[in-house]
Every structure is written in structure tokens, then in C-alpha cells.
Amino acid sequence: MENNLKKVDIIFEVDEKVSPISVLDKTLKRSPDEIILDLIDSGLKGRGGAGFPTGLKWKFARNEDGDTKYVICNADEGEPGTFKDREILDKVPEKIFVGIAICGYVVGAKEGYIYLRGEYNFLLKTLQKKLEIFNNELKQRNFDFNVYLKSGSGAYVCGEESALFESMEGKRGEPRNKPPYPTVAGYNSKPTVINNVETLVYTTMICHIGPEKFKALGTTDSRGSKVFSVSGDTPIPGIYELELGMPLHEFVNEFGDGDAKAIQVGGASGHCVPRKKFNDTIIGFEGIPTGGSMMIFNSTRSMYNVLHDYLEFFTEESCGQCTPCRVGCQQLLKGIEAVKRGERPPAYLEDLKKLTGTMKIAAKCGLGQSVGNPFNSIIDNFREEIIY
Amino acid sequence: MSKYLVNLKINNMPIAVEEGTTILEAARKLNFRIPTLCNHPDLTVAGNCRVCVVEVKGARLLAAACATPVSEGMEVSTNSEKVRVSRKHIVELLLSEHNADCTKCFKNGHCELQDLSSEYRIGDHVFMDLVAPETKIQDISSPSIVKDDSKCIRCQRCVRTCAELQGVSALAVVKKGDHQKISTFLNKPMHEVVCTNCGQCINRCPTGALTERNYIEEVWNAIYDPSKFVVVQTAPATRIALGEDLGIPVGQRVTGKMVSALKKLGFNKVLDTDFTADLTIMEEGTELLTRLKKALVDKDETVVLPMMTSCSPGWIKFQEHMYPELLGNLSTCKSPQQMFGAVAKTYYADKINIKAQDMTVVSIMPCVAKKFECERPEMRDSGYQDVDYVLTTRELAMMIKQAGIDFNKLDNEHYDSILGESTGAAVIFGATGGVMEAALRTAYEIVTGREVPFTNLNIKPVRGMDGIKEASIKIKNVKPEWAFLEGVDLNVAIAHGLANARLLMEKVKSGEASYHFIEIMGCPGGCLGGGGQPIPTSPEIRKKRAEAIYSEDEEMVIRKSHENPEVTEIYKHFLGEPLGHKSHDLLHTHYKPRKRY
């Protein structure tokens, strides 16, 4: 895929003079607490979508007692419309490795893992080779840390951190009850930091450029930049690193085909923003947070079909253990089909919206909790397309 | 280390509980019952049905009360608007994927989902029916367990039971999303997989997805068939639990009432499996002593020790699948149920002048594996199927209700004679450690001429609910013919629940432990916690049932198997001697290795 980056160049920047490993060397000379303070100061929030402050996460794990801790890079990029981690893994894997190693140094872990999406197995061999070189570099430095690769098997839910641990432990990929949270009991029930690919690269880069340069970008609530996967009805699909906090209409002006009627922000589990709201929607934690997926739909698209596809996806990808998600997804899917066919009155959509309210607060993990995002935003804004 | 107390409020009522307590447990202390489905006192926490969600002040999400530990200052509401709406939704969702044809369900009136649905007055629920027609075809391949996927609500209690308590994992979760279901290896029928038929899954299934294969109609038909002479035998553990299904509190013995009810139902003779439990002790005790003699005196290297009990058909099938290399360790004795069938259709039929082909033998068992056992091809030594039908304790309770008998008002009656006499040793077969205790009471006395050196014959070290129990008894001052046992420490071990059995088998295989005799019961607590016993079950309930069993033992006049006069009689007039020719033909069996998949 062609790099056609706009505005910011942190993630994919290749500086011939500063190798990622030299960033590690520089960072290992500092104290873990200093590094944590820098991360907190930078305002970096998790780039997987949930947006938990990275520095805090590392601090919690560092404060846990115990000799065995883990660092895990979540490369199970499964959100429909998201493909930026794949590019990062392909282009700048060393920056990820360094982020994992720095985290290991900070929290006191000796093992790091990259949990690679099953569909990305074509990257496995190359990554493995590069990892061997990297692990050797660590050995030469007498830094007691190794990074390993684990391959997923294609379940969307395994991107959920606790389901990912289960999968790594060889069990069915099903989310766990929380608490305990990963920093207390994660992989193998040991304190674990789990970060998205992009987040780990930002930690490397913050250690390199310092928190000031990072937080100069973005807004108060959404510091820094972010890599976006732009797809759908756009003449220029691809991966772009952009400042956070941009108004959606600017994004549409740049990437749309002039006929955009809706943007699905944050993938299938995100929100659908209709044209009339482009002007007052901010992309960032103060507005609509996103793991990076931006899907553009123009007026030729049926929003019923879009929603139907999403619901089919969730119905299939729910792990199936909890009632609100397993049965709720099926009811939403069958429900809009019944309304479309005229077997249920349009008012049935209100019953289904109430159901998403329950799913949002009673489902066990983020999967079931977020199905209401696309459902409600599409129903509310494109009701006529659903009914008729 | 003492635990910290955590202060919280539930529905505005303050309470302090130990850290680590769940919201569910804390609420119970305040007398707030939070509904649950996937939660079970015998199993690990799953938190997947979400019926127990509660609202915690300040939290974005509702919390699953069963899976969420309390924290300081927490303010919980168990019945707020959010909770009520969500809980009702969740029950409605479960009903939408559940074949709610309740009137046709075997569990009608005994279903936790039905109870919840009634509690929340879910009448005309709004959601679409998701039950696929193909799931309505029941798996009736097993003679013990019926699996009906259309009733399954995916709470996974059965899966956890099979894995955690039994270490078998015949049932597992397969696929995901809308295709997720509880299935067997390669979705094979139940009779083709490693299922041991223990029925522990049935005891914990909240709905009618897993039930026993019921033979109530067959038994009614036999009773009302004038050409059939129908005798019924009752297992030790049935008498201490039957009452639970008939409005009598847990832990109350109903032996006399049960006999009375069986007579009223129309059985021609009401007899006792306890009799053959005593017979089992004679055979098994002798077998043990013979094996010991061959090993210690004759130095016969083909003799296999430790010897293991063979009363529990779930355990037998487990061993056939999982440890076929240890089948030689199993006692060749049939279970008391099967000894009864073989003796009933030969010795007893002869005594009462009934032809074996005209006799129907019905068993009342705390067990569903017994239904499989009676159909084993090895169990036809009388020339006919020795035991014709096996009913669970639960099925008997249903028959009593169907017959319109007010169980509480029944008088106590006695078993018919012969084959109705029993001892305290036979009664305790119903509890884990009971067979061991009964065997020791007899074997010790045979060898030394004295009673076992325990106060009031109560061999406490082999009792109780520890998963694995070990004991060692020094044999001293033996009779001359048992001189080879002088000074020997007889090492025994007891396990109940197949997960514990597996642990013990691994110890035996590795040679880490050197036992002479091992008792294994397939179900937690032994037969008193059997898969055919009244539902619900819990550690507390099983403890009460055990107390009932031991109190029955204490009240018996005769408490040692070898003193049962009917046992003496049958050896004198029919069997000859333990392990004799006739015993060999009727009372002993063999086992077959089975594959694990």
C-alpha cells in the first residue's frame, strides 16, 4: 500500500541517523519513573479505541508486586475498516519492538509478546526474522528481555484484551470477568500491560522526541496524532497520520468524493455520522473516539445494507458466552429484517433501541457493549432507509 | 492471615463483609436474593448469563453480582430501574432462544428459567423466536442422559461440571456467536463419546436441556401387566434424599415411608439393594484378602494391587475410557444393583416360585449411570436382562405424585423378606468412604476375629467430604490362617468425583503411592450426590445427606455385612462361599477397554 501521509509523520518516519534501537539505548539510561512521567505528561491515550492513558497503565503494572510480568502488543487488528496496524507491522516493526522493550524495562517484565491477527500470518516469517535480530541486540546489551510472536486464529473477540489472554493460554477466546484488570492479573494471571501496536510505537517516539513535541499536537482531551485507515467512497483510500481533534467536515473535504452522506467512525463498532452532523463532530476523545477506521459512504449506499452487514458480523463474531451479546445481536439482526419485510411495525425499532441500552451496560465485554453504537446512530439518522 | 472488612451499602443498607466477598454473597447476607442462572455453588464463577447484574453507583456498566468482588464504599442497587429493565431483557432474550414449550418439558415445574420468567411476569415477550427447528431433535442415544439443545441457555454449568468436578469434558462449548452451543467431540451422539453417564450435568442444568432418560411409563406398564411379577430394589442413598422432592426438608430419612409408597404403587415385592451391598462386601472383601495373599505369600506377580471398588458405573466407564491399562485393578464384583438383579432372577425367583422370564426387576437408584449399567451385555447372567428398568430418586418421586399418594402421611413399613434385610454397613455405601468402611469392618474381623479398633465401629478417617482421603490401618494379632498379614499396614485411599479419581489414578500410575485398596465413587459425595438425586445439589445439601446416612447406620441393629442373616443364608443354601463357582457366575463381571474418542 502506498504511503500517502498527511500532516504528521511520526509513526512511519524513518530517520537514518536515529535507529529505533538507539532510542532504546537512550531510554534505558533513564529511570522507569521518569519514563512514566513523560508518558503521562504527553497525554498519550491507547490507540486501540478505548483510550486508556498509557502512562497510567504502565504505572499500575509497575506498582504490582511479582517477579513475573508480561508486555503484550495487541496486533489482533480485527475491527472492520481498520488496517493501519498491518502497515505499521510491515513498515516499522522495530519501533514496536522497542516500545515493548521499554515497557518491559519500566514495569519489570522479562517477556513480551506480539499477538498477531490470524489473517496477518503472511507477516509472520518476516517479523520472526526481525525479532531474532532484535532479541540478539537485547542480549548483546545484557538486557534480560525477549519478545515472542503468537498467532491468533481469526476470532474478532480475541482483540478484547482478556479474550486475547485466554487465546494465548490455549483456551477458547472468551472475555473474562473484570476486575481483575490486566495490570493486576492478565496473561497467565500475572500483571500484564497490553497495548495496541500504534500505542507502542508512540511510546517509542515520545521517548525519542519528548512529550512536548507530542502534546503540541491535537487538543487538550486528545493529545498527539493518530493513524487513520480511510476506506469506502473515497478517491484516495489508505493510511494517514493526522492530528487528533479535527472537525469531521475537514476530513470529508479532504477524503470524500463530494457525495459523502455518512462516515462510519471507529469501524463497525463505532458511530455513524450523517452529513448534517459533519460540521459539529470532532474526531477525538471529546467527540467521537476511534481506533482509526474511517469508512465513507456516498449516496449510492443503502444504510440498511450497511447496518445489516455490521449486525451479521457481530452475530457471528460474538463469542457467545454472555446473553446480552449472543442473543441481543441475533435479535437486532432479525429485528431489522422483520421491520424491512413489514412483519414488525416500525415502532419495533424502538424496542430494539431499548435492547441496545441493556447490551451497552450488561454485556460482558466491549463487543456486546458497543453494538448499540452503529445500531442507534444508523437507525436514528437513516430510519427511512431501514423501514422502506 | 485475617481478611480486611470491606464496608459497602446494598440498597442503602450498610454491611461489612470480608474482602473477596462477591456482591451476590454480600446481598444474601442482607436477605436480598439476586437471581442467578449460570452461578452454582459447586462450580467456578462464569458470569455469563448476566441475570445477576446490579447497579454500582458511579460505574458506567452494570456489574455481574456473582463475579464482582465488593470494594470499599461501594453503593449497590439490586433493583434499580436500569437493573430491572436489563434483567427483564436478559430473561426475555434467554426465552427467545429457548424452546419454551414448557408443558411438554420433563422439567416443567422444576426449571430455573421458568421460575425467573414467572417471577418477572414475562408473558407476551416481544422478541423473535430464535429456536431453530433442527435443535428440537433430542439426542436420545444414551440410555442415561437426554440432551435437548433447544432448551439450552448456554449457561455452561454442564460444561464446568463435566470439566471441573468430573475431569471428563464430554461436553464442551463449540463454535461462536449465534452458532455457539454445548456439544460433544465432533458433535457425536452422547453414547459414542467419553460421557460416563454420571448425570452430574443433569443435576446442574437449570432447564430441561439435560435430563435423565425416563422409564416411568415402562415401569407403570410392568406394574399393571398381570403376567409380570415386579420386584423393586432401592439403593442406600435413595432413602435419605427422596423426601426432598416430596416436600420434606433436606437430610431427613424416609426409609419406611419410601417402602410404604412403593407397596402402594403396586410393586409385588419391595426389596433392598442394601442386601446385595452386604453381599458385595463379602465378595469384594474376600477378593481383596485373596489378592493380598497371592501377592504377599504366593509372590504371584500377576496379582494386581491396589484393588479398586467397582460399585459405581460412572467410575467404571470412566476407567474403561481413561485408564484401560488399570482395568485389572478393578474388583471383578458387580455393583450391588447388578448382584441384586442376578440373584433376584435366580435364587429369589426359585424361592418364590416365579419364572425368571415373568419377573421384572426395577431399581430405584440415586444414579443415571445405572440405567446404562443394566443394559450392559455382561449383565445378563440370569439368562435374561438381570435388571429391567432403573428409575432415579427423582422419577420415583414423580411416580408417587402421579399415583396421588400423600407421602407425608404414609406410615413406615418394612422391606419384604427375603432380600430385604440389611445392615448399617450397607447403608453407608451411599456416602463417599462408605464401601471402604463397610469392607474394613468385615475384613478386619475376618482376619483378626475382633471388631475394627474404632469407637462404635465408626471409622472416621475414611469419612467426610475431602476429595481424596487416605488412611492406614495396622493389622495386629491375626488369626493363624492370616499370619501373612500380621503387622501389615493396610493402606487405603478414597476418592469421589471423577476429577479426584483422576488425580488418584495418576498417583497410582506413577507409583508415588502404594495403596492396597481404593474406593472410588463417580459422583461428588458418593451416591448421595448422585446424578439421579433430587435437584438442587450443593456441598451443604450433600453434607446433610451424609449426616442422615450415618445416623441411619448408627440406628441399625446389625452394622456389619457378614452378620446379615440373609447373607449367611444365601451362602449356605445357594452360593456356597464367597468367590465360589456360583458367585463367579452370577456376581462377578469383566470390563472392556473403550476409546477416548
Image: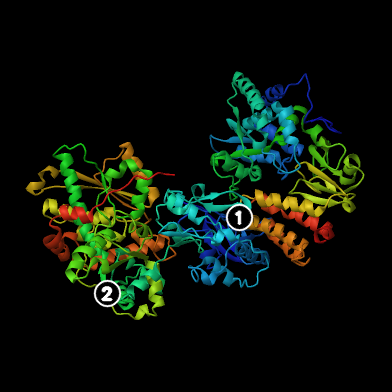
- Give coordinates of residue B573: x percent, y percent: 12, 62
Q: Residue at x 58, y 63 (%)?
A: B98
B389 vs A174: above or below: below
Task: Characterize the local packing of mark 1: few (<14), some (14-19) or many (20 or more) Cα atoms within 10 angstroms.
Answer: many
Determine which of the numbered discs, if any, sits on residue A303 in the image: none
- Give coordinates of residue B352: x percent, y percent: 19, 71
Is B534 placed left or right of A52 in the picture? left
Instruction: Look at the numbered disc 1 and give the secondary structure of its residue.
Output: loop
Instruction: Look at the numbered disc 2 and give the secondary structure of its residue.
Output: loop
- Subunit that carries the residue with mark 2: B
- Subunit that carries the residue with mark 1: A
Q: Nearer the viewer, residue B593 or B5?
A: B593
Is B556 placed left or right of B234 in the picture? left
- Give coordinates of residue B446: x percent, y percent: 13, 53
**Amino acid at circle 2:** Asn
Is A195 placed left or right of A373 in the picture? left
**Amino acid at circle 1:** Cys
Determine which of the numbered discs, if any, sits on residue A322 in the image: 1
A187 vs B566: above or below: above
How many numbered marks are there? 2
Task: Characterize the local packing of mark 2: few (<14), some (14-19) or many (20 or more) Cα atoms within 10 angstroms.
Answer: some
Q: Nearer the viewer, residue A63 or B440?
A: B440
Instruction: Answer with the quarter of the image where residue B546 lies.
Output: bottom left
Check disc 2 and report the residue beneath it. Answer: B268
Residue at the farthest left position? B480
Using the rendered image of the protein, determine whether residue B441 is visible from the camera's viewpoint. Answer: no
Instruction: Answer with the quarter of the image where residue A2 lies.
Output: top right
User: Which numbered mark, 2 or 1, is in the foreground of this view?
Assistant: 2
Q: Are marks 2 and 1 on the same chain?
A: no
Q: Nearer the viewer, residue A202 or A290?
A: A290
A27 vs B435: above or below: above
